[in-house]
Amino acid sequence: MPPKKKTQPKPEEAQAFVASLGGDLRTFDSAREASRGRTVLRRLNRVEYEQTVQDLLGIKTPLAAILPADTPSQGFDTVAEGLRLSMLQMEKYLEAADVALDAAINLGPQPERKSARWVAREDKDIRKNLDTPVGQLSNPKDPKSGHHVLLLELPDAVVYFDRGYPSAKVETGGHPAGLFKLRISAYGYQSGGKAIPMRVYRDNYREKQLIGWYDMTPDQPRVVEVTAQLSANEHIRIEPSNTGIDERGQNVYNIGPKELKAPGLALMWVEMEGPHRRGLAAGQPAQSLWRYPVAKIDEKKNHDKKIAYELTPEDSKAAARQALESFAARAFRRPLEPGEAIASSSSRPMSSIAASSSSRRCEWGCGPSSPRRNSCSSRNTRENSTITPSPRACPISCGARCRMMNCSAWPPITRFPSRRCSMRKSSAC
């Protein structure tokens, strides 16, 4: 500016204008920096929150999907201007924290441990690809549906050439959630002396999460030992990298696996053992709470079969303070100042505090297992509509079951047939 066809300012005039404008901008920037600091204080976005909590608690439970999507600012979801904090986000952060604590503090009964071995040459899906004749139509009406053999069978292994499809789907039957130990045997095939990268995922058919990358030695089998946290009935998926293309740019779809002179991953077998108890009952002090004594609850006196163990520290308050300080020091990545972490004034034993994480006690102290359930001021069932409603609105707008008179989801209950209370409350909220 101004346009080329218009009268242009003299160089010294333009320089003086830019200098004066730059001075004003720098002055404003310096004043703002002096009052607010160099950067704006911001919260973690949902991906950062998930990864931070997983690292602090030693869990693999997905948390980002629980939280609302972060508003992008200038094309990024890590800019402080877009990372605002609303009541809905606070509610969802509390919900995500409950899920994380339930995964980290497991006081339930010891699941039955099992061992399984998967052999690549015996897998039914692999056998189907290898044994079906080349060109056989899967759809007789479609001449293009001819079968392609994409795997190569060796005396001790099955070779995968393609980097994505088909991949090795390791299924060993149903299993509960927990910590599993995996042993994977494989090696690089036709790799010219170079290691073949192998990717290992946990998969539930909806999404897959990477467990790790491993370099498999050429021509000589290598056994990789992996420890992974798996959800109930999840399976393992294995895929190669840097494979499937020969020097002429051909792949397994062009010339078939027998003629293809390209690198591949020769997969032999996978062994899975677990679940191993990773938590309080196992006595493994890997986290701040796991250092305290654990006792098994008498089965005759235990009415909640989901809880089998309880914490039994000598001083509940001191143990809670110690656990909080240890966790906060790791979260802040620095030693705490004296008195910075204040332990809860509650006198409840740690066993009941840990148990409340699994039973989802009401945040007002009137949860489903509370003796105050029948006299809770927030309770209002269909059969009794004369109870005085609580002055507090439902903090989560659960709608499906919560019958508080001033809840934003009231009335009627049938308007929200698909909504479910995220606190898992009963019909008597």
Image: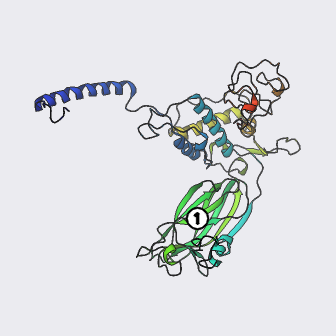
Asked if residue 58 shows in the view, the reply is yes
Q: Is residue 412 left or right of residue 21?
A: right
Front in this rendered view, residue 198 or 349: 198
Residue 184 on image: x %, y %: 61, 68
- Circle 1 Cα neighbour tier, 10 Å, few/some/many (<14 / 14–19 / ≥20): many
Q: Residue 320 occupies which quadrant of the picture?
A: top right
Residue lying furthest right: 300
Give the residue type that dot 1 points to: Ile
Name the residue: 75% across, 36% down. Answer: 352
Q: Tell me the element at label 1.
A: strand
Residue 249 on image: x %, y %: 42, 73
Is residue 328 shown above or below 138?
above
Q: Is residue 294 left or right of residue 303?
A: left
Q: In which quarter of the image is the C terminus?
A: top right
Front in this rendered view, residue 246 or 344: 246
Q: Is residue 302 left or right of residue 222?
A: right
Residue 295 on image: x %, y %: 78, 45
Asked if residue 290 shows in the view, the reply is no
Q: Residue 154 occupies which quadrant of the picture?
A: bottom right
Q: In this view, does 197 lie to the left or right of 169?
A: left
Q: Quadrant of the N terminus?
A: top left
Residue 384 on image: x %, y %: 84, 23
Which residue carries the number 1 mark? 238
Q: How many marks are shown on the rendered structure?
A: 1
The color scheme shown is rainbow
Is residue 255 shown above or below 312?
below
